[in-house]
Amino acid sequence: MPNDEFQWIQQLTPDRHVQKHVIEGIGDDAAVFGTESGYYQLLCVDTMIENVHFKKKTMSPEDIGHKALAANISDIAAMGGIPVFYVVSIAVPSTWTDEELHGIYKGMSNIADTYQMDMIGGDTVSSPHELMVSITVYGKVEQDASLVRRNARPGDYVFLTSPTGRSAAGLELLLKKGRLSDFNDREKALIACHQRPIPHVQAGRAAAQTKARIALNDISDGLASEAFELAEASNVILELYKDQIPIAAELRLYSEKDCWNWILYGGEDFVLLGTVSPSDWPRLQEAMKQQSIETYWIGEVKEGSPHVMLTDQSHTKILQKSGYNHFRPT
Ligand SMILES: Nc1ncnc2c1ncn2[C@@H]1O[C@H](COP(=O)(O)OP(=O)(O)OP(=O)(O)O)[C@@H](O)[C@H]1O
Ligand SMILES: Cc1ncc(C[n+]2csc(CCOP(=O)(O)O)c2C)c(N)n1
Ligand SMILES: [Mg+2]
Ligand SMILES: [Mg+2]
Ligand SMILES: [Mg+2]
């Protein structure tokens, strides 16, 4: 732990901002920024805590910083937005070194640079046991775009912007062997999905730019759970076709049971799950393709009381809303 809170804050203060709307960044009682006309403002917060979201065994300090910000950027992506600023709250136990904390901030600033985001504030406290990092992200989206969860309608198609399940498979490898063990290239790819997820900002932007009625959600708690959230918010049924759900090449080696467990319930994929009308689907696919993003058609929206169904050949079963639940961790 650093030996002076205030010196530490001073040394992590950026000396310039990329975003021109910052009026006051770190150094006063609150950050001050202007807004742009024509945009709605987006605000979200997500928290990561040691032994729940990461362990020293599973993630390096830089991974922790990267993923904490990536998870928040992913929520902005799920609204079709552009991430702009962030503020960081960190609770630090005495066992974490200056160098490790520096690593966390380096992980954040590296991914922030990718999206030209500025850190404009935060809060620092000590913690008796575990490290916690909570990031609040501010973003913006054009006022004529609307990608809210309640947008799904019967007859819509259900799509995914990438296969799911790799992060959970990577986590299992890390929990078994630890991040400093030897892994083959396939395992390394799975581990990277867990440690350094890439938020689907370009996919969200492409969806927003179609101006179509699209419901969008990012996958943090698992495909089944997030599909259920779309169903509930829109008061519809989502029917997913098992043979249309993409299986990542890196997962094909594992047992059917493990593979489908990760795909449906694993979580922390940070890819996007959405619905769109059949008439807007070709336009959406084209907009995605122009950004070199593949979209996977995985099902249809049906009328009825909200739930998620998984159809395999002609056999249909109801998918439970299982996946990650903080009050019911497995
Ligand atoms: N403790 C809380 N107090 C107030 N609102 C909350 C609280 N926790 C969650 N919410 C709100 O509930 C909604 C769902 O939150 P949730 O955290 O499940 O979504 P998410 O951030 O997309 O998912 P995840 O946290 O799994 O990445 C959001 O609108 C969020 O702002
Ligand atoms: C050490 C360790 N054990 C378990 C997990 C799995 N995990 C933790 S939180 C979460 C859901 C997303 O979080 P949130 O809902 O807070 O966004 C998942 C899938 C992990 N990452 N590390
Ligand atoms: Mg959340
Ligand atoms: Mg989300
Ligand atoms: Mg969650």
Image (cartoon, rainbow, N blue to C red):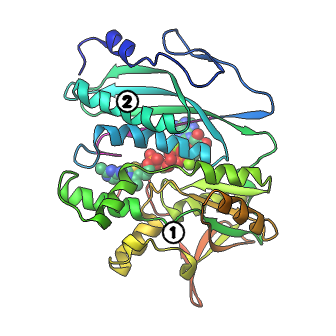
Is residue 203 placed above or below 157 in the rendered structure? above
Residue 113 on image: x %, y %: 50, 34
- Identify the residue shown where x is 46% and y is 21%: 122
- Identify the residue shown where x is 23% and y is 13%: 3
Q: Is residue 48 magenta?
A: yes
Is residue 215 placed above or below 312 in the rendered structure? above
Give the class, few, some or many, for how many residues have Cα within 10 Å of label 2's Cα (few <14, many ≥20).
some
Residue 208 is left or right of residue 299, and the answer is right
- Identify the residue shown where x is 45% and y is 27%: 88
Residue 257 is left or right of residue 114, and the answer is left
**Residue 305, picture quadrant:** bottom right
Distance (Cα) linking label 1 and label 2:
38 Å
Of the numbered discs 1 and 2, the one sitting upstream in the chain is 2
Q: Are marks 1 and 2 in contact (CB under 8 Å)?
A: no
Disc 2 is placed on an element classified as helix
- Which dot, 1 or 2, sits closer to the camera? 2
Is residue 129 placed above or below 316 in the rendered structure? above
Give the class, few, some or many, for how many residues have Cα within 10 Å of label 1's Cα (few <14, many ≥20).
few
**Residue 203, picture quadrant:** bottom right
Identify the amino acid type marked 1: Gln
**What's the magenta region?**
43-54
Mark carried by residue 33: none
Mark carried by residue 105: 2
Disc 1 is placed on an element classified as loop
Out of 298 and 237, give the one closest to the viewer: 298
Residue 279 on image: x %, y %: 82, 69
Give the residue at mark 1.
320
